[in-house]
Image (spheres, rainbow, N blue to C red):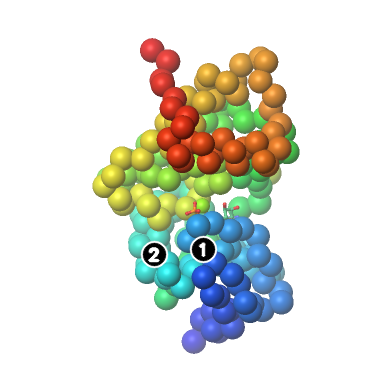
Amino acid sequence: MNDIGRVITEIRMEGTSVLQKPDEFMLIGRGRSAVVFKIPGEQKVLKVFYPDFVHLARLEASIYQELSNNDYYPSFYEGGEGYVVLEYLEGLTFYECLIQGIVITEEMIEKVDQALNYARMKGLNPSDTHLQNVMLLSNGGVRVIDVVRFRQTRICTHWEDLKVAYDHFYSTRFFPKKYPVWFIEMIIRLYRKGLIRLKKRK
Ligand SMILES: Nc1ncnc2c1ncn2[C@@H]1O[C@H](COP(=O)(O)OP(=O)(O)OP(=O)(O)O)[C@@H](O)[C@H]1O
Ligand SMILES: [Mg+2]
């Protein structure tokens, strides 16, 4: 068993709660299907799927193997039962940028578009690209994380909808660039309930 294999046996989760983990592994992110730990002393993270989502690990590993030679995606190092090891990205998700008031530029949006186009070129169907799945790096680069749903056949409009919201509201002069968490969460909830519909400008 390698080091990561050993670490995995020391992590205990129930539902979406982490009950036990090695002290030196800092929890740096959470999603609907996994938690992400920084691996100490290395520029790597360990993404561990919740018990009900363990099956997604091999799927995500195989998708990363197709994408991670491209600069817009984190490098993929290894995968196993319920986990993947990826390059640690130092920076902020676009969600965190909105909260901290760090301006999301058109150039950043274009970079995400290029990343998603690359995935399409590889025969994938980029899906679930939302504010917490795109990151602005400290060096100005942009990365798309969380590619686990890139092989689904269903059409996902999350990213297109975000771009419409960006064009209509965010990029206009009068709109603030910094938002409280409760406000963003309220918009996300309304959007998920289908109470906000966005139309592309002709
Ligand atoms: N390579 C990475 N480097 C740094 N932080 C990361 C990395 N990968 C993920 N994170 C952080 O962990 C969070 C959760 O990771 P991820 O989006 O992969 O989980 P998920 O459960 O698949 O998410 P979702 O709810 O979108 O399905 C991210 O939003 C981000 O904050
Ligand atoms: Mg995510």
Tell me the tag on residue 34. Answer: 1
- Badge 2 local density, few (<14 within 10 Å), some, or many (20+)? some
- Disc 1 versus disc 2: distance between alpha carbons? 9 Å
Q: Residue at x 37, y 69 (%)?
A: 55
Q: Which residue is mark 2?
A: 56
Looking at the image, residue 2 sits to the left or right of residue 124; the answer is: right
Quarter where residue 66 is shown: bottom left
Tag 2 secondary structure:
helix
Q: Residue 137 location in percent, x, y? A: 63, 44
Of 149 and 78, the residue lying toward us: 149
Query: Do the CB atoms of the residues marked 1 and 2 lie less than 8 Å apart?
Result: yes
Q: Residue furthest top?
A: 202
Q: Residue 144 location in percent, x, y? A: 50, 45
Of 79 and 171, the residue lying toward us: 171
Looking at the image, residue 18 sits to the left or right of residue 60; the answer is: right
Under mark 1, the amino acid is Ala
Q: Residue 53 location in percent, x, y? A: 42, 67
Under mark 2, the amino acid is Leu
Q: Is residue 40 visible?
A: yes
Q: How many marks?
A: 2
In the displayed structure, 75 sits above or below 85; it is above
Would you say the beta carbon of the disc 1 residue lies within 8 angstroms of ligand 1?
Answer: yes
Quadrant the C terminus occupies: top left
Q: Residue at x 32, y 44 (%)?
A: 125
Q: Residue at x 58, y 63 (%)?
A: 36
